[in-house]
Amino acid sequence: ISWIKLLPKMNSGGETEALERLNKHLDRKAWVANFERPRITAQSLFASPTGLSPYLRFGCLSCCVFYYSLRELFMKLRRRSSPPLSLFGQLLWREFFYTAGTNNPNFDRMEGNPICVQIPWDHNPEALAKWAEGQTGFPWIDAIMTQLRQEGWIHHLARHAVACFLTRGDLWISWESGMKVFEELLLDADWSVNAGSWMWLSCSAFFQQFFHCYCPVGFGRRTDPSGDYIRRYIPKLKDYPNRYIYEPWNAPESVQKAANCIVGVDYPKPMINHAESSRLNIERMKQVYQQLSVPIHHDVSYYSSRGLSKTCANLSGEEECFEMFDDEQLIKRLHFLIKNIITDFSLAQVLCCLKNTPVIISEAIYTV
């Protein structure tokens, strides 16, 4: 990283600032009283001036203060009714990864990590550098990595997109490399949360549905059809029409000239064919999982007879993975895990610990 190129700070540190931000959230009484799972919008891709995740990371805000402040307000507004676990879901994910990393000093690496599937990733420093520097040729991916470098924060679904792209989705590069980049650039990088999230998104642990990949074109287009996010972080593409801003390589030469940005000259060509790479990588993942000593059976009786539970449900689903499941039920199971988790992990325990539910994080802590 060239520290000289970093922009002025966007966040003031300290407990005073953290508590002021928390109070701004608590002032939104209607939001607390009628809490619903937040939906991603184009605006949510930009950093919030009341974001709390860096303050939780550095201990400027106590997670206990956060928890009990929310709980007390909810019970006051809803006449002492118990708050839904989803209200605290982001904190629970944090505690889940903290617990999973306990007594596992190799939680942040493949070697010696008993819960990590040993996937034979490629070693490709050149491809890694293009990804880290936002030079992949995919505007959605490059905009995310540019925002990360400039601001030290990206939306949790943006993290999903670039993590999948680097690992099992396209480049087939180890999650360890991506984790180190996030560790260096994210203001809210947290050892256990960062490592756990990268293992999950690369299907190395916690999550098995490797056939679900984030498209580096379609996912961004659905989130921000107008492409304003890309125009902000990749100004070279600002004059491209909406039709081509997510895939400028498909724009006719006349459109590229009118936008003063020629693909391959002013902006890089795509470094990879996503359709071909994702198809190949799904087959690679399939082979890895077929070689595991713990079989993934589709017959629930196989697991119940062994005191385990099947985790790979809805195998034929085509929806985006973070939209497939009942958050409230998932978080209840997560809450149970945090209270009862076994620290002597084995692959079987990790893959089968959430009863009848795929092991997936649908709401990360980074949205607070």
Image (spheres, rainbow, N blue to C red):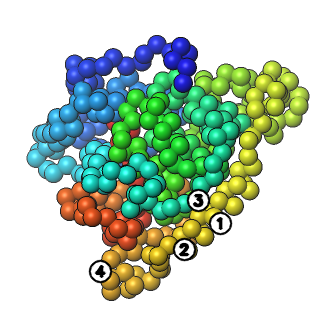
Q: In the image, what residue type sits under mark 4? A: Gly
Instruction: State the residue at coordinates (30%, 19%).
Output: 13
Which is more N-terminal, label 2 or label 1?
A: 1
Is residue 235 shown above or below 309?
above
Q: Mark 1 points at which residue?
A: 283
Q: In the image, what residue type sits under mark 2? A: Gln
Disc 1 is placed on an element classified as helix
On residue 307, the disc is 4
On residue 120, the disc is 3
Q: In front of the other: label 1 or label 2?
A: 2
| Label 4 packing within 10 angstroms: few (<14), some (14-19), many (20+) | few
Name the side, left or right, on which 131 lies relative to 200: right
Residue 168 at x, y percent in the picture: 59, 55
Q: Mark 2 points at which residue?
A: 291
Which is more N-terminal, label 2 or label 4?
A: 2
Q: In the image, what residue type sits under mark 3? A: Pro
Which is more N-terminal, label 3 or label 2?
A: 3
Residue 26 at x, y percent in the picture: 23, 31
Instruction: State the residue at coordinates (33%, 50%).
Output: 105
